[in-house]
Image: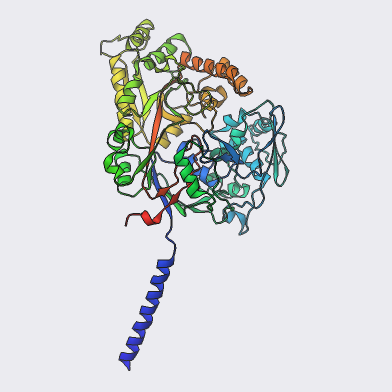
Amino acid sequence: MKTKCFRLLCCVCLALLGAGGLQAQNRPVEKVLRYAFEIAETGFDPAQISDVYSRIVTENIFDSLYGYDYLARPAKIRPNVAAGMPVISDDFRTYTIKIRSGIYFADDPAFGGKKRELTAYDFVYSYKRIFDPKTKSQIYSDLDEEKLIGLNELRREAEKPGASFDYEKEVEGIRALDRYTIQFNLQETRPRFIYQLADAGIFGAVAREVVEKYGDKIMEHPVGTGAFKLDQWTRSSKMTFVRNPNYREEFYEAEPPADDARSQAIYKQMKGKRLPLVDRVEISVIEEIQPRWLSFLGNDQDFLMYLPAAFAYQAIPNNRVAPNLAKKHISMERVPAPDVTVTYFNMEDPLVGGYTPDKVALRRAIALAYNSEEEIRLPRRNQAIPAQGPMQPSTYGYDPKFKTEMSEFSRARALALLDMFGYVDKNGDGWRDRPDGTPLVLEYATSPDAASRELNEIWKKNMDAVGIKIEFKVAKWPEQLKASRAGKLMMWGLGFSASSPDGAGALSLAYGPGKGEGNLARFENAEFDKLYQKQQLMPDGPERLAIMQQMVKIMVAYMPYKFSTHRIRTDMMHPWLLGYRRHPVSRAFWRYVDIDTSKLPH
């Protein structure tokens, strides 16, 4: 009897195991997009962040009114949560927009267990937050340029001792006409205001309940209406995002160029599919280039965002995928990036700052002594082109034929300027001193990774050659950013990426009202600011281009920034990653790519 019972129990267990195994076999394999950042994120509040890596995240969590067609080239604006294109007044000062109904935020305890619909009031609140001094928004100056009527008055009231920002007060500049209609009213003509409305990374809608619930912790609690939501986060190490179950019904539609065979093939494969296509996104932070490269080769990452230049010769010799990688069906996406690499001089620093002829001469001498071609040839392995100014490739205003002193390398001119203005070796130690005899020592902020160390070597070699002593202040990138905003760095090298197709965004790096925000050099020049405001009002055309180039010449004359290169970016993909294309300005690509689980290595 015991034997029969034991056999019966075994049969039942085997049957249950068999059923479970069958269910496991029939269960869809989770699609996970895995890749790595080379620099750590700073947080996920659109109003507070300014770094590109955090913006990649926020563009995929939050929704702006408009977005970009994923495959259209050149970049093309299209409605996102808006019900259509805006109704724009003839003078480009009023933009009226209908919002689609039935769009919901991801679930969060802040909503008390109820589904929370996106409304026009959420956009009004989100834009007002940028003007609230308490938010300390790094993009305030960007929005301030648009002259939204009444918002600066609210800000000034909030800046008074003991006052707070009045979110309840209606202003003409941004109003909810009803639950699903928002209107922007601008003091001046703004023909390109729609670019602001298409940047979800910084102008995405947030819910007031979420901001008030989490307060100072809001950077850790992103709650949006986008395709993904934050699942787990280990700061500066790993981030995991999952589908937003409340995400609206959206299907893959695009307008790829007729002469772009790859984009046409992607569209044919993806057209009509429900978005997002993947279930999870896992992002690791791997700052050192070799571990990041090996992680990709070891199949731990589905694609390599930004091939480290150090591996360019072995990964893409002659700018083609190496034969050993091609055998694994690894492909690449190689495009001139709409970015610019720069070193800024803190214009308030007692050594390199200031506007007197001797200080201008010092900065220009340093810039002339630095060999950007050497940077391109050695640390960047020819994966960049020289920059003539701030305007980036693929943006309006960029002209490869426009030449300035910015890219000039002339050690003789640098030496002559230093000698002429009294920067000579006064104590015989082999290093130049200031005109007053005190030591001339540059302090250059940098990061503790291999790529930064290679760039530092170029700086040291070139400064040594003209007798200028340079020391390097090493810290993690987020720490340097914090110090930079506070005006505590003398010099720092970093990159700026375009967030719209308009090159004037890069000119904001020198716009006075953005000092300490986008304008990390803290440069102030009345003529530059006047020209900046003037070109903002103008339609695109030769007259506007001429003013933009005149502004670049002012920057060259005072040299608050040394613009070095425009990088050529190469992303590498394993064969199971489907549909990836690098967009000129948008970073909201997670929902458009797919994982072919049948091709995953086992």
Instruction: Say whether residue 139 is visible.
Output: yes
User: Where is residue 224 drawn, in percent x and y?
Assistant: 56, 48
Depicted 27 relative to depicted 284: above or below: below
User: Where is residue 399 drawn, in percent x and y?
Assistant: 48, 21
In the drawing, does residue 190 fall left or right of residue 18?
right
Q: Residue at x 58, y 42 (%)?
A: 204
In the drawing, does residue 225 fall left or right of residue 298?
right
Q: Residue at x 67, y 31 (%)?
A: 148
Figure disc tally = 0
User: Where is residue 541 drawn, in percent x and y?
Assistant: 59, 20
Quadrant assignment for the C terminus: bottom left
Which of 544/36 is in front? 544
Q: Quadrant of residue 294?
A: top left
The residue lying furthest to the top in this view is: 420
Q: How is the image coloured?
A: rainbow
Q: Residue at x 51, y 15 (%)?
A: 554
Instruction: Say whether residue 42 is visible.
Output: no
Quadrant assignment for the N terminus: bottom left
Which of 541/586 is in front? 541
Q: Quadrant of residue 476?
A: top left
User: Where is residue 452 drawn, in percent x and y?
Assistant: 33, 31
Which of 114/264 is in front? 264
Depicted 210 relative to depicted 343: above or below: below
Q: Residue at x 31, y 18 (%)?
A: 463
Which of 329/506 is in front? 329
Q: Quadrant of residue 335?
A: top left
Depicted 412 relative to depicted 108: above or below: above
In the drawing, does residue 566 fall left or right of residue 90?
left
